[in-house]
Image (tube, rainbow, N blue to C red):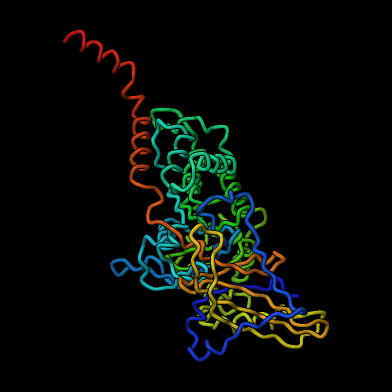
Amino acid sequence: MIISKDLFLLGDQDYLRLPKDEKRTMVRPATTKNQRVESALPCLPCLPAHHPHLPHRPLELVFQGLTVTLDKRHILRDVSGVVKPGQLLAVMGPSGCGKTTLLNCLSGRVKLSAGNLRLNRERLNKRWKRRICYVLQQDIFFPDLTLRQTLEYAALLRLPDSLSHSQKMQFVDHIIDVLDLGSCQHTIIGDYLKRGLSGGEKKRANIACELLTNPALMLLDEPTSGLDSHSAYNLMLCLKRYAEKEGKTVVVTVHQPSSQIFHMFDKLLLLCNGQTAYFGDGNKVVEFFNNIGLTVMAHYNPADFILEQVKGSEEMKEKIITASRDTRLRPDYPPELQPEYFNHSICDKYLNNYHENHLHSNGHLVSGQCHCQREMWTNAQNSIARPSTEVCVAIGETTESQGHVYTTVAVKEEEGKTLWLDNQSHASSSVSSSDEDVSYQWPTCFWTQFKVLSQRNFQEARPRMLSTLNWVQTVALGVMA
């Protein structure tokens, strides 16, 4: 039986590259009583099902050879990496190495001079930018509003009018609970003159405002800066659990993490002079430095050690960068970062993956086949039912012990939709993604924006307008007049 852990990553852009004659010859196999078609999509836990921005699949981020040049100076040069849903990618390096520039590139704020950036094998566009949240290093809030008021006004503005007020408040409660902000939700934000939230609480409040739209990709620029070690650890632990629990893709930049925080990283990207000094699993970076003759002392924080090395002499930096380039030739280098990754045809990619890894039944594999076909699917989940063109891929397995077993995967052809399935799930899938296409240019109408902004402005200015000094001044002027 073929289960969904046999599926890798589907991109219908490969189908679009096929010749017309080859498309016509692709026929979807008919099922018989000895065949079975599985169609169960694993659901992400803990997210409200009614939320309109709920992604029907997680998001995989792949960037290859990113290069940014400004005034003939290379800010980034040939930086590559990949991070999958549920993983936490940490970008480390000394000051001025290009960490923030990399996040700006991933969010689409900085134009690339060269390179390839894909989200689920699709180029970054406006639709994907709506699923990206970017938490800046500086926290910008209204100091006189409480934490809950800040989140409520953000929800009323950023969530669509199709949701009722109670539904929006339910999602605010969910975010407060997930980020453990319940004890301070009625505390004002505060500033230098007014005591309010602590530094760690402000960081989590900043993250909470971005999570209201339920993004698939989270970018955070030095979220632990300005925090003590305990607050920084709790914040990173919260992000780590949230990524694993709800299948989010998280990319953070950190300057000098503690050893506890360092061991939370699933993936590590080390930058040196705008170039990749290391990319891979966080728990293998010590082995990488040992292989090039730089041994980490026992009971020494690996983060401190690697930062000391990339701040060393120019010869040391070049040695580390050269060793990082050599790792691209190793067989365990991520296949997503290979140049030909986006060039394989959809059928060849699936069939090769099955033949090499999974098309086995008790060790007896007879044959496998792959077919593609364009079909019309109707989206029944939306109130606006409309047909959408889909690419249907069926992969068949024939074994000695049983007949054909077909696994069918459907993705939309119109906009290059893709599919990512968790390797630990136990069901193949049939996904129609046209229900994600009913989107609006603005989530709220003009009247909603005017009403919410007016209410927020009055709420924020009320302490100044209705202060005791203003009352005394108004009464005194009235008496004198």
Give the residue displayed 50% in from the left and 70% down from the top.
388
Q: Is residue 361 left or right of residue 284?
A: right
User: Can the viewer see residue 316 in this picture?
Assistant: no
In which quadrant of the rendered image does the C terminus lie? top left
In which quadrant of the rendered image does the N terminus lie? bottom right
Query: Residue 465: which quarter of the image?
Result: top left
Q: Is residue 99 left or right of residue 250?
A: left
Give the residue displayed 42% in from the left and 65% down from the top.
273
Q: Nearer the viewer, residue 220 or 145?
A: 145
Q: Is residue 328 above or below residue 20?
A: above
Query: Residue 418: which quarter of the image?
Result: bottom right
- Residue 204 in the image: x percent, y percent? 51, 42
- Seen as rendered, the residue at the extreme left is 481
- Residue 163 in the image: x percent, y percent? 49, 46
Q: Is residue 32 above or below residue 385?
A: below
Q: Nearer the viewer, residue 101 or 461?
A: 461
Q: Is residue 413 above or below residue 83?
A: below
User: Can the viewer see residue 438 in this picture?
Assistant: yes
Q: Is residue 258 left or right of residue 153?
A: right
Q: Nearer the viewer, residue 314 or 198?
A: 198
Query: Residue 459: which quarter of the image?
Result: top left
- Residue 68 in the image: x percent, y percent? 37, 68
- Seen as rendered, the residue at the extreme top is 479
Give the residue displayed 54% in from the left and 68% down from the top.
378
Give the residue displayed 40% in from the left and 30% down from the top.
144
